Image (cartoon, rainbow, N blue to C red):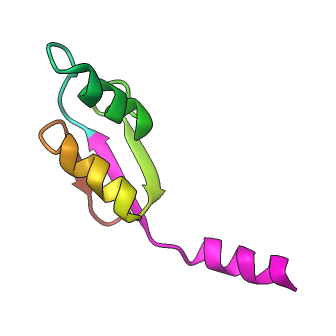
Amino acid sequence: MAKATEKTAASTAKTVTVEQIGSPIRRPFSQEATLVGLGLNKRHRRSTLQDTPAVRGMIAKVGHLVRVVEGE
């Protein structure tokens, strides 16, 4: 029965979609690595992730290079 609750919790988990709008060229390595951690590597690519405090912190770190896409 534990597997059934895990599937339900995973399907109802909130998500956040981010789109890369800036280039990591001439940025510190840590910012480039954060983009890779978010699943982004080129401009205008989108990645949908679970909305956790860790992901929100990563978005805040590279907030000038990404935007949160609403409605998806």
Q: Give the extent of the magenta segment.
A: 1-19
Q: Does residue 40 appear to the left or right of 10 in the view shown?
A: left
Q: Where is residue 38 in the image (x, y as percent from the top left)?
A: 40, 41
- Position of the N terminus by quadrant: bottom right
- Position of the C terminus by quadrant: bottom left
* Residue situated in front as seen by the camera: 38 or 44: 38
Residue at left offset 20%, top offset 40%: 62
Q: Is 14 within the magenta? A: yes
Residue at left offset 41%, top offset 64%: 52
Quadrant in the picture for residue 46: top left
Q: Is 5 within the magenta? A: yes
Q: Does residue 37 appear to the left or right of 11 in the view shown?
A: left
Q: Where is residue 29 in the image (x, y as percent from the top left)?
A: 27, 20
In this rendering, is residue 58 above or below 5?
Answer: above
**Residue furthest top in the image:** 26
Q: Position of residue 35 (x, y in %)?
A: 33, 33
Residue at left offset 18%, top offset 36%: 65
